[in-house]
Amino acid sequence: MRVHQFLMLFVSFCMLACSRFVLAQHATGADVFSGEQAFKNYCANCHGAAGNQIANVDLGHGNFRKPYSDEELVTIVMKGIANTPMPATPNMSKEQAVQVVAYLRSRALLKDVGAGGDAVRGKALFAGKGECFNCHRLNGQGSRLGPELGKIGLVRTSEQLATSLLDPNAEIQPNNRFYAVTTKGGEFVRGRLLNHDAFSVQLLDTKEQLRSFMKTDLKIEEFIPSPMPSLRDKFNDQELADLVKYLVSLRGADKQ
Ligand code: HEC
Ligand code: HEC
């Protein structure tokens, strides 16, 4: 019975305390991910996926018009802002609202994420722990499955790069989309979609082979999520900053 009582005490302690601690602690990757899903479902139609569609409101960079506490933001998310078009979201549980706020706060970290980074360490992470060459090509080395990154620093900001690393599916360039087909013979092939017309589909498969299929031979064909793994749980903030700093330095010229 004592174990039981202890458990009850623990549970009620948690109900009182955990909800306050969730935000004070570092939110987990899973919380942020659920928050992002809820944001897409409930908020993005007005605020836009990047959070900046409403004039003077910029949720996408953790910039708010007032220095709201987490608790105040949770209340805004659940109850809306009275006498403005910002609505209450009655279907949103407190737990979900806490996750949405964790997600919005995490967006602030994306701003200038490369600032404290070290490109030399980032280069080592790219080749080592990140296993980026498994899918990406750089200076003639690596796989062609994912996009070539030799000039990525010219065309993406550090914020876009951080988003690519943390949420590979958030924004995919049209020519980088992944596609899967199942032939009538039962073969399953997935890869980068190279071309797609009324009669045929061409893919670069995961072994970097060019594959072409007639649509009449296919049972199933569909877009599939990016195979790129999120670095959210694998890399800490410093490693992420190092990697972004390195990617920003990739500008096609001189030594890299
Ligand atoms: C029907 C459109 C609409 C929806 C849906 C909506 N918002 Fe808003 N939101 C607004 C508008 C408009 C404002 C600005 C209100 C004002 O004038 O103060 C706003 C303001 C805010 C603010 C205050 C920003 C600041 O800097 O003061 C936050 C935070 C916010 N919304 C978060 C959310 C979240 C999170 C969701 C999803 C749960 C959401 N909103 C859903 C329209 C919407
Ligand atoms: C399993 C394969 C795979 C691995 C491993 C992988 N990527 Fe990717 N990556 C892709 C694919 C496929 C895309 C294109 C689709 C997308 O945007 O997610 C991509 C997209 C990107 C983009 C966006 C490119 C653009 O044009 O905006 C960046 C930046 C990137 N990867 C960096 C990295 C880095 C850095 C690593 C190592 C930490 C890495 N990737 C590991 C497959 C991979």
Image (tube, rainbow, N blue to C red):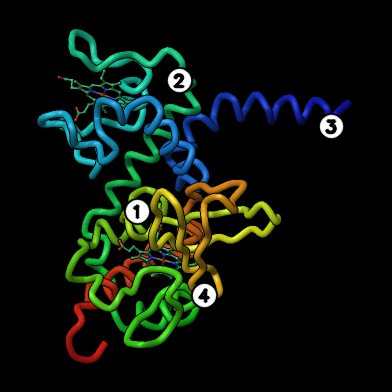
Who's the residue at 38% across and 40% down the image?
103
Q: Quadrant location of ligand 2?
A: bottom left
Residue 35 image position (x, y, % from top left): 43, 36
Distance between the Cα atoms at labels 1 and 4?
A: 22 Å
Vertically, is 158 above or below 246?
A: above
Pointers 1 and 2 in contact (CB under 8 A)? Answer: no
Vertically, is 205 above or below 59?
A: below
Name the front one of labels 4 and 3: 4
- Per the image, the residue denoted by label 3 is 3
Mark 2 CB lies closer than 8 A to ligand 1:
yes
Which comes before the other along the chain, label 4 or label 3? 3
Which comes before the other along the chain, label 3 or label 1? 3
Visible residue check, residue 76: yes
Who's the residue at 47% across and 31% down the image?
20
Who's the residue at 69% across and 31% down the image?
10
Distance between the Cα atoms at labels 4 and 2?
A: 46 Å
- Per the image, the residue denoted by label 4 is 209
Residue type beneath disc 3:
Val
- Per the image, the residue denoted by label 1 is 172
Which comes before the other along the chain, label 1 or label 2? 2
Residue type beneath disc 1:
Ile
- Hey, which residue is sitting farthest right in the picture? 1
Pointers 1 and 4 in contact (CB under 8 A)? Answer: no
Mark 4 CB lies closer than 8 A to ligand 2:
no
Which comes before the other along the chain, label 2 or label 3? 3
- Per the image, the residue denoted by label 2 is 92
Please state, as top left, top right, bottom left or bottom right, where the C terminus lies in the image: bottom left
